Amino acid sequence: METLFTDRGLAAPLTLGPSTTDPAVADQWLGWTAAGMQGLVFKHLNEAYRPVRSWRKYKVRVTTEAIVGAVSGSLALPRTALLGRYDAAGHLQYAGRSTTLSQTASRALAERLTPAPRAHPWTGWTFSAIATSRTTSTPRSRSEVSAQTRNDGCARRSLI
């Protein structure tokens, strides 16, 4: 492949991905999510590229804790969760939002939500990604979230 790239003068946006047969090297690559690496693809060494293939994909998922600071929809039936993390000064900073919650997840989250007091740190904030109503909640509900990093052209996004 390297010869093909050189001989044909191929350049960005095309790029060659690394390959290895060493499991220890592949394991190290799983830590490259900060560089935009999404996972690994496994295939037989002699398998050619075909439209229908037996390749296996392993996507990297990173989990962390976040505070549910607000929801779209209502506290009784949240549609998405707006998540925050405390900074070094102890201020709750917006970190992202969930994908649309399943009915089961929505009901489970609703059981843990309470209306926010007037002194909520996000009072008056506008979240442009949320087209529906936004309701702040008491920022005490801690949830484990799984974030998947994705590159869209030049933009790097994290789906939570």
Image: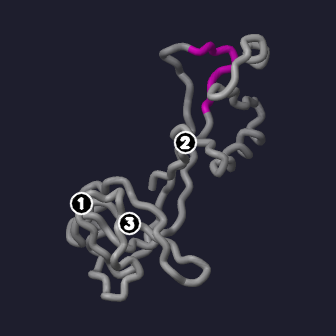
Rendered position, 2 above or below 30: above
Is 117 placed left or right of 31 in the picture? left
Q: Which is nearer the N-term, disc 2 or disc 3?
A: 3
Side (left or right) of 81 relative to 149: left
Report the amino acid beneath label 3: Leu
10 Å neighbourhood of mark 1: few (<14), some, or many (≥20)? some
CB within 8 Å, label 2 to label 3: no
Q: Name the one closer to the observer, 4 or 37.
A: 4
In terms of secondary structure, what is the magenta stretch mainly?
loop
The x and y percentages for residue 113 are 30, 76
Numbered label attached to residue 82: 3
* Residue located at (62% from left, 28% from top): 13
| Residue 151 badge | 2
Find residue 132 and name its label.
1
Q: Is residue 31 left or right of residue 146?
A: right
Give the label on residue 67, or none: none
